[in-house]
Image (tube, rainbow, N blue to C red):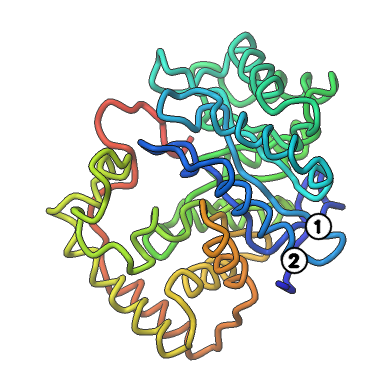
Amino acid sequence: MVTQSIKLGGTAADVVVARVSHGLMAITWAPEPVPDEICFEAIKAGIDALPPGVKAFLNTADFYAMDMGTGNLEMLSRFYDKYPEYAERTFVSVKGGIDPAKHGPNGSYEYLKKSVERSIEALGPRKKIDLFQPARIDLNVGIEKIMETLVGFVKEGKFDHIGLSECKADTLRKAHSIYPICTAEIEVSPFEYGEEQKKVIATAAELNISVAAYSPLGHGFLTGQIKSPDDLPKDDPRHRFTRFKEEHFRNNMALVDDIVRIAQKKGITPAQLCIAWVCTTGPTVIPLPGSSKASRTLENLEGGDVVLTEGELEELNEAIGRHKITGDRSFGEGINMHLWH
């Protein structure tokens, strides 16, 4: 059983969740979605590993499927149908507001309403959405109008808490001044820890907002299990990330080699080292790795129990600072996802 837990922020400040959350994207956003029985075991194992009173933070979206549909939420609905007693032991965060027709965010009242309502329908009657967040900030609408819409949905009882994703620190502060933000979801890993991440983390700590740090393992790159771009399945979405392309892969492997070396010396996995490091970046930061296997879910959770010594942290930070990562973190050309707004 894992031991570490953390309280959420904003209007969910009384909710205690595992120190490490569980991202569900890869379960269904894949050329061949994972069978239900394997998905369910991956989710159930993480919940069963937690002490009484501690909830599993599950991260999903209404577009986590190859067709940008609600397949991930539908999978989760089937999970709750089979294990209804687990509904109260989980905290479900849903991202939405991505319009396939625009290849990007749509923050209009009409589209957010559509996104929320289809999420509620897909998740089913056994579990209410705990947290809803627009996956990106629609600059054509603006954060003030988006917040007005989301607060209205809270008052209507559609979900309980509001989060933001890929927001800048100033945007987070402005949104929080309108209504308490529970969680800010941003990418944080040894691959991604720049000035904007540091500003968001610092602002979140000041305002007691949780930071859901997604891709702490660099989309699997930092686990040391991927030795070449050819190791990825032919239709794997990660082929679209420039960091996985041959012209950048070898350069970026240099940091992975150091992570593997430090982890072996510590007697933990590279994934656990990265997760433990992400935990050190701020008092409200919650690593958000993905998992579609029970063994991986448990490995990730155990990373939240790892304590890095001052020397180990110094060695890892030195390696992160020494290696210049190349290739950007976006999906590549044609995806208008407006990072950092």
Residue for point 51% across, 18% down: 106
Q: Where is residue 225 in the image (x, y as percent from the top left)?
A: 33, 66
Query: Gap between marks 1 and 2, in whole Å?
Result: 7 Å
- SS class, disc 2: strand
Label 1 neighbour load within 10 Å: few <14, some 14-19, many 20+: some
Residue 51 against residue 313 in the figure, above or below: above
Q: Position of residue 110 (x, y in %)?
A: 62, 8
Image quadrant of residue 176?
A: top right
Label 2 neighbour load within 10 Å: few <14, some 14-19, many 20+: many
Residue 268 against residue 160 in the figure, above or below: below
Q: Name the residue under label 1.
A: 16
Residue for point 78% across, 54% down: 55
Label pair 1/2, CB-CB below 8 angstroms: yes
Q: Earlier in the sequence, mark 1 or mark 2?
A: 2
Which residue sits furthest left? 247
Question: What is the number of the mark on residue 5?
Answer: 2
Q: Quadrant of the N terminus?
A: bottom right
